[in-house]
Image (cartoon, rainbow, N blue to C red):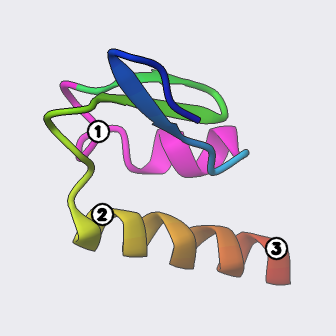
């Protein structure tokens, strides 16, 4: 998602967001959403970690 002031990444998992809380310091988070300013995108390495965590979580 995006607005004029921020974008959002939706891992749709409270446990994934919680597991990466230290890496997400400075970003606005809620259980299934990570919001970040348009001028400060999430690092690609962090996005990869979040996606891999969700894949593992979905695999059970």
Mark 2 touching mark 1, by CB under 8 A?
A: yes
The residue closer to the viewer here, 1 or 48, is: 1
Can you give x and y, in whole percent of width and height, for residue 25 in the image? 22, 30
Decide whether residue 1 is among the magenta residues: no
Using residue 55 as the reference point, say whether residue 35 is left or right of it: left
Residue where numbered disc 3 is placed:
58
Can you give x and y, in whole percent of width and height, for residue 12 in the image? 72, 45
Answer above or below: position of 57 versus 52: above
- Of label 2 and label 3, which has the lower sequence position? 2
Q: What residue is drawn where x is 26% and y is 69%?
A: 44
How would you rate the neighbour count of disc 2 (Cα within 10 Å): few for under 14, some for 14-19, many for 20 or more?
Answer: few
Answer above or below: position of 51 versus 27: below
Decide whether residue 23 is among the magenta residues: yes
How would you rate the neighbour count of disc 3 (Cα within 10 Å): few for under 14, some for 14-19, many for 20 or more?
Answer: few
Look at the numbered disc 3 and give the secondary structure of its residue.
Answer: helix
Using residue 48 as the reference point, say whether residue 24 is left or right of it: left
The label on residue 24 is 1
Decide if residue 60 is in sight here: no
The residue closer to the viewer here, 5 or 29, is: 5
Residue where numbered disc 2 is placed:
46
- Of label 2 and label 1, which has the lower sequence position? 1
The residue closer to the viewer here, 32 or 36, is: 36
Answer above or below: position of 40 versus 59: above
Q: Kindly report the distance in space between the C-alpha atoms of the residues bearing marks 2 and 1.
A: 9 Å
Q: What residue is drawn where x is 66% and y is 38%?
A: 14
**Magenta region:** 13-26
């Amino acid at each position: 998602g995006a607005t004029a002031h921020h974008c959002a990444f939706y891992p749709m998992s409270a446990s994934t967001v919680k597991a990466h809380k230290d890496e997400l310091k400075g970003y606005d988070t809620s259980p299934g959403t990570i919001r970040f300013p348009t001028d400060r995108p999430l690092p690609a390495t962090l996005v990869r970690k979040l996606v891999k965590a969700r894949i593992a979580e979905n695999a059970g």
